[in-house]
Amino acid sequence: FRDTSPYRDEDLFVAQNSDFSARCTRDAATPGICLSERRIGGADFTFRFPRSWLDQWQDVASACATLIAQLNAARRVN
Protein backbone atom coordinates (compact mmCIF):
# COMPACT_ATOMS: atom_id res chain seq x y z
CA PHE A 1 0.00 0.00 0.00
CA ARG A 2 1.10 3.59 -0.49
CA ASP A 3 2.91 5.38 2.32
CA THR A 4 0.03 7.88 2.55
CA SER A 5 -2.51 5.08 3.07
CA PRO A 6 -3.72 3.97 6.52
CA TYR A 7 -2.50 0.52 5.42
CA ARG A 8 1.05 1.72 4.66
CA ASP A 9 2.74 -0.98 6.76
CA GLU A 10 0.70 -3.78 5.21
CA ASP A 11 0.79 -5.81 2.01
CA LEU A 12 -2.04 -7.23 -0.06
CA PHE A 13 -1.66 -10.70 -1.53
CA VAL A 14 -4.07 -11.90 -4.21
CA ALA A 15 -3.83 -15.40 -5.65
CA GLN A 16 -4.23 -15.88 -9.38
CA ASN A 17 -6.97 -18.32 -10.43
CA SER A 18 -8.37 -18.44 -6.89
CA ASP A 19 -10.64 -16.34 -4.71
CA PHE A 20 -7.99 -16.24 -1.96
CA SER A 21 -6.61 -12.90 -0.84
CA ALA A 22 -5.01 -11.69 2.36
CA ARG A 23 -4.01 -8.37 3.87
CA CYS A 24 -0.88 -8.81 6.00
CA THR A 25 1.14 -6.73 8.40
CA ARG A 26 4.88 -6.87 7.95
CA ASP A 27 7.22 -8.66 10.30
CA ALA A 28 8.64 -6.19 12.82
CA ALA A 29 8.98 -6.41 16.61
CA THR A 30 6.23 -9.02 16.35
CA PRO A 31 5.62 -11.48 13.50
CA GLY A 32 3.30 -10.33 10.74
CA ILE A 33 -0.36 -11.36 10.81
CA CYS A 34 -2.68 -11.85 7.83
CA LEU A 35 -6.43 -11.40 7.50
CA SER A 36 -8.40 -13.16 4.81
CA GLU A 37 -12.09 -12.36 4.47
CA ARG A 38 -14.86 -14.21 2.67
CA ARG A 39 -18.56 -13.43 2.35
CA ILE A 40 -20.75 -16.52 2.09
CA GLY A 41 -24.45 -15.79 1.80
CA GLY A 42 -25.21 -13.28 4.54
CA ALA A 43 -22.18 -14.12 6.67
CA ASP A 44 -18.74 -12.54 6.71
CA PHE A 45 -15.83 -14.79 7.70
CA THR A 46 -12.47 -13.37 8.77
CA PHE A 47 -9.53 -15.72 9.08
CA ARG A 48 -6.40 -14.61 10.94
CA PHE A 49 -3.12 -16.46 10.45
CA PRO A 50 0.65 -15.85 10.65
CA ARG A 51 2.22 -14.18 7.64
CA SER A 52 4.78 -17.00 7.56
CA TRP A 53 1.95 -19.30 6.39
CA LEU A 54 1.68 -17.46 3.06
CA ASP A 55 4.21 -19.88 1.57
CA GLN A 56 1.47 -22.51 1.93
CA TRP A 57 -1.42 -20.25 0.91
CA GLN A 58 -3.18 -23.09 -0.96
CA ASP A 59 -3.35 -25.09 2.29
CA VAL A 60 -4.64 -22.04 4.16
CA ALA A 61 -7.30 -21.43 1.48
CA SER A 62 -8.33 -25.09 1.58
CA ALA A 63 -8.57 -25.10 5.39
CA CYS A 64 -10.73 -21.95 5.29
CA ALA A 65 -13.04 -23.54 2.70
CA THR A 66 -13.30 -26.73 4.79
CA LEU A 67 -14.19 -24.77 7.92
CA ILE A 68 -16.85 -22.79 6.08
CA ALA A 69 -18.34 -26.02 4.68
CA GLN A 70 -18.43 -27.54 8.17
CA LEU A 71 -20.14 -24.46 9.59
CA ASN A 72 -22.70 -24.50 6.77
CA ALA A 73 -23.40 -28.21 7.37
CA ALA A 74 -23.87 -27.63 11.11
CA ARG A 75 -26.22 -24.70 10.39
CA ARG A 76 -28.40 -26.92 8.17
CA VAL A 77 -28.66 -29.59 10.89
CA ASN A 78 -29.80 -27.11 13.54
Image (spheres, rainbow, N blue to C red):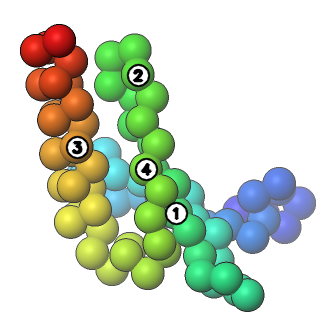
- Name which residue lies at 84% across and 67% down: 3
Q: Name the residue under label 3.
A: 67
Secondary structure found at label 1: strand
Q: Counting residues from the N terminus, which is met first, the one under dot 2 or under dot 1?
A: 1
Which numbered disc flags the more N-terminal residue, 1 or 4? 1
Quadrant in the picture for residue 59: bottom left
Query: Is 37 or 1 nearer to us in this picture?
Result: 37
- Residue for point 12% across, 25% down: 73
Q: In the structure shown, which secondary structural element does the residue marked by tag 2 occupy? A: strand
* Rendered location of residue 54, percent (x, y): 38, 74
- Vertical placement of residue 18 versus 15, above or below: above
- Residue identifier under label 4: 47
Find the distance from the CA under tag 2 to the CA under tag 3.
13 Å
Q: Residues within 10 Å of mark 1 (few under 14, many from 20)?
A: many
| Residue tagged 1 | 34
Q: Mark 2 points at which residue?
A: 43
The three-letter amino acid code for the residue at tag 4 is: Phe
- Per the image, label 4 sits on a secondary structure element best described as strand
Depth check: give the residue in front, 3 or 39: 39
Give the Cα separation between the discs numbered 2 and 1: 20 Å
The picture quadrant where one finds residue 11 is bottom right
